[in-house]
C-alpha cells in the first residue's frame, strides 16, 4: 500500500465523492444479493452444475469482500446484507434456477458498470471493469446453458 499524497484525503475518490461511494454501495448490495441467490440456486441444480454454483458464489464473495474493504478504507460504512432477497420470478426447478443465475450476473454487471461511469480513480476503474467482465462471462455461461440468444448483450452491464 502506498502512503497518501500530502493534501489528499485517505480513501481517495470513495472518501470524497458521494456519487462514487453510492455506486460502490449499490455494487456491494448486488454482491450480497448474488451470494444469497447462489445459495438458492444450488438447491435446484443437478450435480454436474454444482461446481459452477460454488465457483460463482465464491467469486461474488470475493467481490463483496473487495467492496467492503474499499468502502471501509475510505471511511464509509458498507451496507449490510439483507436476510433474504426477492427473486425476479419464483425458483422452482433447474430452469428457473438458471434464470436466477443469469439475473444475478446481469445485476452485478450493471452495478459495476455504474461504478465505472461514476469514477475517475484508475485502481477503482480497474476493479469495476474486472467485476463487470467477470459477471458478463459468468452470465454468458449460464445464458448458453439456458439457450438464451445472444448469450451476451451487446453492452454487458447496461440496463
Image (tube, rainbow, N blue to C red):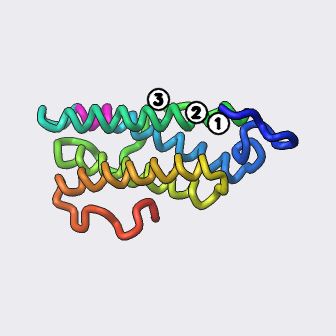
Q: Quadrant of residue 35?
A: top left
Q: Nearer the viewer, mark 3 or mark 2?
A: 2
Which numbered circle lies on residue 71?
A: 1
Task: Say whether residue 74 is left or right of residue 124.
Answer: right
Using a 10 Å C-alpha cutoff, classify the residue at mark 3 as few (fewer than 14 neighbours), some (14 to 19) or many (20 or more).
few
Residue 77 position in % (x across, y down): 67, 32
Residue 74 position in % (x across, y down): 71, 36
Indicate whether residue 40 is drawn in magenta.
Answer: yes
Q: Quadrant of residue 148?
A: bottom left
Residue 28 position in % (x across, y down): 53, 40
Using a 10 Å C-alpha cutoff, classify the residue at mark 1 as few (fewer than 14 neighbours), some (14 to 19) or many (20 or more).
many
Residue at x 41% of width, y 67% of height? 155
Q: Nearer the viewer, residue 98 or 10?
A: 10
Residue at x 60% of width, y 47% of height? 123
Using a 10 Å C-alpha cutoff, classify the residue at mark 2 as few (fewer than 14 neighbours), some (14 to 19) or many (20 or more).
many
Label pair 1/2, CB-CB below 8 angstroms: yes
Residue at x 85% of width, y 40% of height? 6
Task: Say whether residue 148 is left or right of residue 110.
Answer: left
Task: Say whether residue 10 is left or right of residue 91.
Answer: right
Residue at x 44% of width, y 60% of height? 157
Task: Say whether residue 53 is left or right of residue 62.
Answer: left
Pointer 2 residue: 68
Label pair 3/1, CB-CB below 8 angstroms: no
Is residue 111 visible in the rendered image? The answer is no
Q: Classify mark 1: helix, strand or loop.
A: helix
Magenta-tinted stretch: 38-42
Instruction: For marks 3 and 1, give the CA distance.
Output: 21 Å
Which numbered circle lies on residue 83?
A: 3
If you read the primary sequence from the N terminus, does the residue marked by circle 3 or circle 2 appear first?
2
Residue situated furthest bottom in the rendering: 154
Is residue 51 visible in the rendered image? The answer is yes
Amino acid at each position: 500500500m502506498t502512503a497518501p499524497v500530502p493534501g489528499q484525503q485517505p480513501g481517495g475518490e470513495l472518501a470524497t465523492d458521494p456519487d462514487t461511494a453510492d455506486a460502490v454501495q449499490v455494487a456491494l448490495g448486488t454482491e450480497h444479493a448474488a451470494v444469497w441467490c447462489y445459495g438458492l440456486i444450488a438447491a435446484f441444480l443437478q450435480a454436474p452444475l454444482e461446481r459452477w454454483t460454488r465457483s460463482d458464489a465464491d467469486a461474488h464473495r470475493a467481490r463483496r469482500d473487495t467492496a467492503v474493504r474499499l468502502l471501509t478504507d475510505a471511511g464509509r460504512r458498507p451496507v449490510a446484507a439483507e436476510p433474504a432477497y426477492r427473486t425476479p420470478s419464483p425458483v422452482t426447478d433447474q430452469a428457473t434456477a438458471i434464470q436466477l443465475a443469469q439475473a444475478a450476473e446481469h445485476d452485478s454487471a450493471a452495478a459495476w458498470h455504474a461504478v465505472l461511469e461514476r469514477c475517475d480513480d484508475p485502481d477503482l476503474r480497474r476493479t469495476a471493469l474486472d467485476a463487470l467482465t467477470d459477471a458478463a462471462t459468468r452470465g454468458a455461461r449460464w445464458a448458453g446453458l439456458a439457450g438464451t440468444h445472444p448469450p451476451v448483450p451487446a453492452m454487458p452491464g447496461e440496463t
